Amino acid sequence: MTTHLTMFSGMEIPRDKSASADAAAAALGEMPEWDLSDLYSGPDSKELKSDLARLDKEADAFQARYQGALPSLAGQGGAALAGSIRVYEAMSDRIGRVGSYAGLLYAGDTSDPVTAKFYGDVQEKLTGITTKLLFYELEFNRLDDGVLEAALKDDELAHFAPWIEDLRKEKPYQLSDEIEKLFHEKSVSGRGAWNRLFNETMTALRFKIDGEELGLELTLNRLLDRDGAKRKEASQALSGVFGENLRLFTLITNTLAKDKEISDRWRGFEDVADSRHLANRVERPVVDALVDAVEDAYPRMSHRYYALKARWMGQDKLAHWDRNAPLPEQSKQVIEWARAQDLVLDAYGAFAPEMAAIAKEFFEKNWIDAPVREGKSPGAFSHPTVPSAHPYILMNYQGKPRDVMTLAHELGHGVHQVLAAKQGPLMAPTPLTLAETASVFGEMLTFRTLLAQAKTPKERKALIASKVEDMLNTVVRQIAFYSFERKVHTARGEGELTSDQLGEIWMDVQRASLGPAIDLRPGYETFWCYIPHFIHSPFYVYAYAFGECLVNSLYAVYENAHDGFAEKYLDMLRAGGTKHHKELLEPFALDASDPDFWAIGLKVIEDLIDELEAMDA
């Protein structure tokens, strides 16, 4: 059951107290902070307490009414079975509303102990409620195939056919009711507890930079500074603090990898990433083909680009802290929030007015939390909440071009989530591989708009180089992350890994992916420990590369055939989780299961690097 108990990467972002930071914040203009009252008015609201009490009673009644009764219902026909699904779906929406509110409140300020306690308490209560409902999907999967096939001829049940088809894919891996119940109840004190330990440890970390103590997000942001000395100082501060906490992060990683191995073994998954592939509704050979294609292209993409960048910066090799350094040609202008909003909405509107209209609501109705502030989670996300409400976007806007792209990315998610909401709580969620399609497409629209506005060759070069770096971070870096995870989880099967072993695996995959033009200096071997995806969503990372390559191919179709493309694209987003990736891509004559498919997407990156090399000729 989809409970929306999202474990956000709650790492603190303390407010920079310097005068220069205050001036930088003022230059960005007024930025929105989200209003969560569309979910609940507050953690002590009567509505929230009432919903929790109501859900507890409804779960008891649902269990009493339907446990053991599904075969009889199926025998009565599809309408009776569909009625039970509708009750289950309605509870899923309310459970998701409560869980989303607690998670978003926590993400907004992970440093507040009262909020952290509220988040933990809600998780425990929802786990208790959903434990009572575990039987439903398990028993549904025990229904006889023939009986279910006959029941699906009824239109009421046929509406839920995509959800049922997805559910049946879980059947080979489900365990007995008692074991499933044990796994579910212990998640709060097991994986969930280790996730929270990681979050709150990261919240407490401080990195001393130029006499100030900063949180992770502001420290990572210094790696984008124009001053090389500041980038080096930030990198050394990161490696120093990571090194001091390495024993704890090693324990967390070992524990969670073992926890996953136990679960996978009991369920019968053959490969360390098979559970993620199942959740993503993508076949292992498709992902393997993606990984092979990207790794084969390392020399033509990342190796070649970073050698080019090193020459631009007058160096033989780039220190690892210079990998994302701004180019001399890049504009020093800080992009105000209002300008960023206009850029993204204009790009969306030129493609499809409906997309811009939906995106505009996020700004007008305070569905975005944009400024950097103390206690707030780092990075960015768009959380769908539930179909009866709307998504919320969190980001940490600091006025850089990459921040504009992040805004375009998260709004792509948001538009997708709004369009898919009509599919309902059970069928609106999109597998991660396709969930990244709209976000990356939104970035591409915004990039092309900016590129069209470039006034000089230098400005064009800077924009293309920035886009190439974003693509390399999305494709090469994420596939390297996936390779790292595979090696770690495979090695963990032979016993615990030391910090040194984890560092060696990290350095091996980084050398292979980044190439000889990047000099990985001492200290970089600790940088694996802060990646939250490794902790919260094992093997999630390849979804980014999947989405980037897919969108590159999709955008090529758009450039060659505008008529009717936008409506086909929006229909794809409206489908939510009701269709497999093969069916969704068919209207565009694309097929991700074709081994040559990935080469098409990667060639877009290679062509941009070709253009940059030609500018230097």
Image: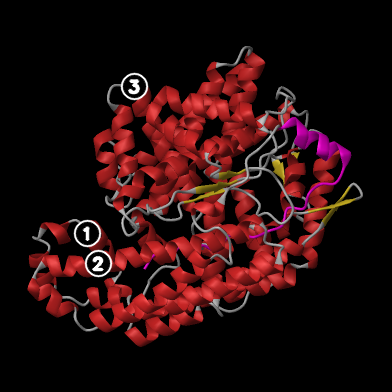
**Circle 2 SS class:** helix
Q: Quadrant of residue 560?
A: top left
Residue toward you, 175 or 36:
36
Return the x and y of residue 258 as percentages of the image width and height: 54, 77
- Residue at numbered disc 1: 160
Kind of residue at badge 3: Asn
Q: Residues within 10 Å of mark 1 (few under 14, many from 20)?
A: some
Query: Which residue is more in the foreground, 486 or 31?
Result: 31
Note whether 461 is above or below 49 in the view shown: above
In the rendered image, residue 527, in percent from the top left (x then y), is placed at 70, 56
The residue identified by callout 2 is: 85
Dominant secondary structure of the residues highlighted in magenta in the image: loop
Indicate the amino acid at tag 1: Phe
Decide which of tag 1 and tag 2 comes sooner along the chain.
2
Of tags 1 and 3, which is closer to the observer?
1
Q: Is residue 609 visible?
A: no
As drawn, the residue found furthest toward the front would be 46
**The residue under label 2 is which amino acid type?**
Ile
Residue 514 sits inside the magenta stretch: no
Q: Is residue 316 above or below residue 96?
A: above
Mark 3 or mark 2: whose residue is earlier in sequence: 2
Is 458 displayed left or right of 37 in the figure? right
Residue 305: quarter of image? top right
Q: Residue furthest right?
A: 211
